[in-house]
């Protein structure tokens, strides 16, 4: 009787903390086994085989990794591709000049001839996925060190890769899952001729900018369109004017019927990185040490950029993408802290760990395998703490002082020359030249000089002596400890901040170039800071991190063995995943309930003429006044954004939101503020993903931009209203 009671209690506890509905980023090839039944129960009308199949065309054939950092989907038989505005932004910015300002005014190719090529952009399709765990772990034993283990794994992966069946134009990827307890192989196809087709003005595509970012209610038309090009045989090919629009195996049908409360939805894409299985101590460190430090540094970075971007239009364009990426994570970390604190993420983890330890201790076999894994993790994370902080300082600061970016690039030439002589140098040179050419296009030494002063201040004042460069200390002393003076002197001493100077330098004979770089004062300072980092931080951190990785692997295996009642999904790792959940609002705070839909009326309510975040194009206002929504409106209103309980993450930007039939109903682009902690601690009551309603996108394309020819390419359906 007692044991039944205890069992029921456990059951309840774990239904709450473990078996959360909607949680999970699932592997497409395992849907039939793990999820299909539940999905059908939630309202799905298609089968797992319709979503992922290696025998017939399936939904997965319409999904791509967009440039490795976002997701995109094919929406016409002519290779038309949909993704977010913020995903296409790099491309949009690269074609923008003060004269042709596509960021401000939008861009629309009125025929395929006008579509704009993007040299470094690519999209990758997943052809098939296989479980290769036993082949990869073959010969791996418990007694191995981490590096022995890794080299055995690398060897096995190599063998696998060589043996895998693939076409000449396909690639093979093998990735670890569940902290290295499982491995999957991916056959992929990458297309490298991807052209910009259309983008709304930023005032639509990024409406609400930083104020609204990571927030609900939202009113953003965060989309852009591209087209995949292939060679005459429909195969991947480098850019060529002779390439033709790609004919996809599958393109998504688009539903004009929208979604309503509790409708089944799923999001298919490439979430980047989550940490769902960390111990409490790691979450605590993130809350107390790492997030606050990174937020503090970025506060400074943003205020420097902001000051210049507000007063100089050229700088505003040059720094737009850098701003967006710095501010995006900066704001997310703050939301994460808030959410983790509010739901007591650490406390929840601790509760789980107590239960874990109790179960382990009660079973001699488990105890001998996993008895100390948690205490070992606690110890290792404590040792990591100060080095982890120093690592964050170094990476956040070094990567934002752009003079060091130049120094690092130039130094690669020295390394190539030293390691492989003139031949090595010659191979490296064109790479470095092309990287620097695009770098200088978006570089302002004025901004950088201020940034250098501000960030070096943090580097020196916030850090223990042992983590700081001696050379920097000397230089600082020489300028009476004044960081502004120091920075001014650093820029005066060197010419590498000047594009023309660097171009001229790189045209000289290798020996001369290498000599000059070797003696450059910025390169020397950069190398000294790098050395200190390597010797004082990395040398200590790496062995601890290795230990942690091994322990996390054990802890993962242990959780799967100890909590047998739970269905586990692997952390995100930029591989293709499916998540599903119902359309639903949420309660952000006591007494407030958020609805799940927003409309154009709400866009107009936020409208602030001339404001840099909430301005709107005149034509949109005009369409609103006339209520000219065509087939995209419902009951006189135009749906703009909606939310649902899909478990998404960074990298899911641009992912399709699909209805019960697998039709495209929305475009994923964000999460709600209260739920940004879902990467670490998913909570079904407040974690929601935010999507643009597909009807808003079609309205903008058709009614606003007059690019109805693109809508004509698509397959529009009405699964709910007209069967
Ligand atoms: N927060 C979303 C994401 O992580 C949107 C970012 C783009 N928007 C912005 N205002 N920066 O990508
Ligand atoms: N905006 C994010 C991205 O770029 C997706 C939203 C999220 O992180 O949930 O991938």
Image: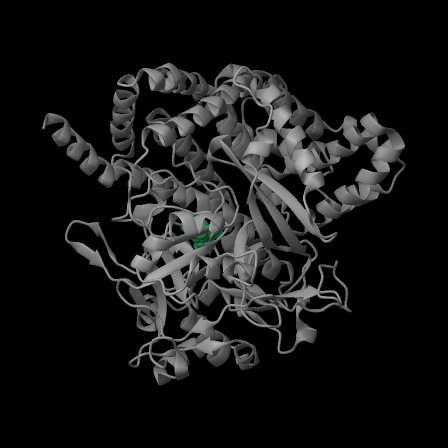
* Residue depicted at 27% across the width and 49% down the height: 686
Q: Position of residue 588 (x, y in %)?
A: 23, 50
Position of 34 compared to 399: left or right?
A: left
Q: Eyeballing the image, is 685 above or below 206?
A: above
Q: How many marks?
A: 0
Q: Position of residue 308 (x, y in %)?
A: 53, 49
In front: 438, or 303? 438
Coloring scheme of the render? one colour
Residue 158's quadrant in the figure?
Answer: top right
Q: Quadrant of the N terminus?
A: top left
Q: Position of residue 547 (x, y in %)?
A: 49, 19
Q: Can I make out residue 251 in this image?
A: yes
Q: Can I make out residue 477 in this image?
A: no
In front: 604, or 183? 183
Q: Quadrant of the C terminus?
A: bottom left
Position of 26 compared to 353: left or right?
A: right
Q: Position of residue 571 (x, y in %)?
A: 44, 39
In front: 158, or 221? 158
* Residue depicted at 78% across the width and 69% down the height: 242
In front: 360, or 274? 360
Q: Eyeballing the image, is 635 above or below 536?
A: below
Residue 712's quadrant in the figure?
Answer: bottom right
Position of 367 compared to 571: left or right?
A: left
* Residue depicted at 51% across the width and 47% down the height: 325
Q: Eyeballing the image, is 236 above or below 362?
A: below
Residue closest to the far left: 1
């Amino acid at each position: 009787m007692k044991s039944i009671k205890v069992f029921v209690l456990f059951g309840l506890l774990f239904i709450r903390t473990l078996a959360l509905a909607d949680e999970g980023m699932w592997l497409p090839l395992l849907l039939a086994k793990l999820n299909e039944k539940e999905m059908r129960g939630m309202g799905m009308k298609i089968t797992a085989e319709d979503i992922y199949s290696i025998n017939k065309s399936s939904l997965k054939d319409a999904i791509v990794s967009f440039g490795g950092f976002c997701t995109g989907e094919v929406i016409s038989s002519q290779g038309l591709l949909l993704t977010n505005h913020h995903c296409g932004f790099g491309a949009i910015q690269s074609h923008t000049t003060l004269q042709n300002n596509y960021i401000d005014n939008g861009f629309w190719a009125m025929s395929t001839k006008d579509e704009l090529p993007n040299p470094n952009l690519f999209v990758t399709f997943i052809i098939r996925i296989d479980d290769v765990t036993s082949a990869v772990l073959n010969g791996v034993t418990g007694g191995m060190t981490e590096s022995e283990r890794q080299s055995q794994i690398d060897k096995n992966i190599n063998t696998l890769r060589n043996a895998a069946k693939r076409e000449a134009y396909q690639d093979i990827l093998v990735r670890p899952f569940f902290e290295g307890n499982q491995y999957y192989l991916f056959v992929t196809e990458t297309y490298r001729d991807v052209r910009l087709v259309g983008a709304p003005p930023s005032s639509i595509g990024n409406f609400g900018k930083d104020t609204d970012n990571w927030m609900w209610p939202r009113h953003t038309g965060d989309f852009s369109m591209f087209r995949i090009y292939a060679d005459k045989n429909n195969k991947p090919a480098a850019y060529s004017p002779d390439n033709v629009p790609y004919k996809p195996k599958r393109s998504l049908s688009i539903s004009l019927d929208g979604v309503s409360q509790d409708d089944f939805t799923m999001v298919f894409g490439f979430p980047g990185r989550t940490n769902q299985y960390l111990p409490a101590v790691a979450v605590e460190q993130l809350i107390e040490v790492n997030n606050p430090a990174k937020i503090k540094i970025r506060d400074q970075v943003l205020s420097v950029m902001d000051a210049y971007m507000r007063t100089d239009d050229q700088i505003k364009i040059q720094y737009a993408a850098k701003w967006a990426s710095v501010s995006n994570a900066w704001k997310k970390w703050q939301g994460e802290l808030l959410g983790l604190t509010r739901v007591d993420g650490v406390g929840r983890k601790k509760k789980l760990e107590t239960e874990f330890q109790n179960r382990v201790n009660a079973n001699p076999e488990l105890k001998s395998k996993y008895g100390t894994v948690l205490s070992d993790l606690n110890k290792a994370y404590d040792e990591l703490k100060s080095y982890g902080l120093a690592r964050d300082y170094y990476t956040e600061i070094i990567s934002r002082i752009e003079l060091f970016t130049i120094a690092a690039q130039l130094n690669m030439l020295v390394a190539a020359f030293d390691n492989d002589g003139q031949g090595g140098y010659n191979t490296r040179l064109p790479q470095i030249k092309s990287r620097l050419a695009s770098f200088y296009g978006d570089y302002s030494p004025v901004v950088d000089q201020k940034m250098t002063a501000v960030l070096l201040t943090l580097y020196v004042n916030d850090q223990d002596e042992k983590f700081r460069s001696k050379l920097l200390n000397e230089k600082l002393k020489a300028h009476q400890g004044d960081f502004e003076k120091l920075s001014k002197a650093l820029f005066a001493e060197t010419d590498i901040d000047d594009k023309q100077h660097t171009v001229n330098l790189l045209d000289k004979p290798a020996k001369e170039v290498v000599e000059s770089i070797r003696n450059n004062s910025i390169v020397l300072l950069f190398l000294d800071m790098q050395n200190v980092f390597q010797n004082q931080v990395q040398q200590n951190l790496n062995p601890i991190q290795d230990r942690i990785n091994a322990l996390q692997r054990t802890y993962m295996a242990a959780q799967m063995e100890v909590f047998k009642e739970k269905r586990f999904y692997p952390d995100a790792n930029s591989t293709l995943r499916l998540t599903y959940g119902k359309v639903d609002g949420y309660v952000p705070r006591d007494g407030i309930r958020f609805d799940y839909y927003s409309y154009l009326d709400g866009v107009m309510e936020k409208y602030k003429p001339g404001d840099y975040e909430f301005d709107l194009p005149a034509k949109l206002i005009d369409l609103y006044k006339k209520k000219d929504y065509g087939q995209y409106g419902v009951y006189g209103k135009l749906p703009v954004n909606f939310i649902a309980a899909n478990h998404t993450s960074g990298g899911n930007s641009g992912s399709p939101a699909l209805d019960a039939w697998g039709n495209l109903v929305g475009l994923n682009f964000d999460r709600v503020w209260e739920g940004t902690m879902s990467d670490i601690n998913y909570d079904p009551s407040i974690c929601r993903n935010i999507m643009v309603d597909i009807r808003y996108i079609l309205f903008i394309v058709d009614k606003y931009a007059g690019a109805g020819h693109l809508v004509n390419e698509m397959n529009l359906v009405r699964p709910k209203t007209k069967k």
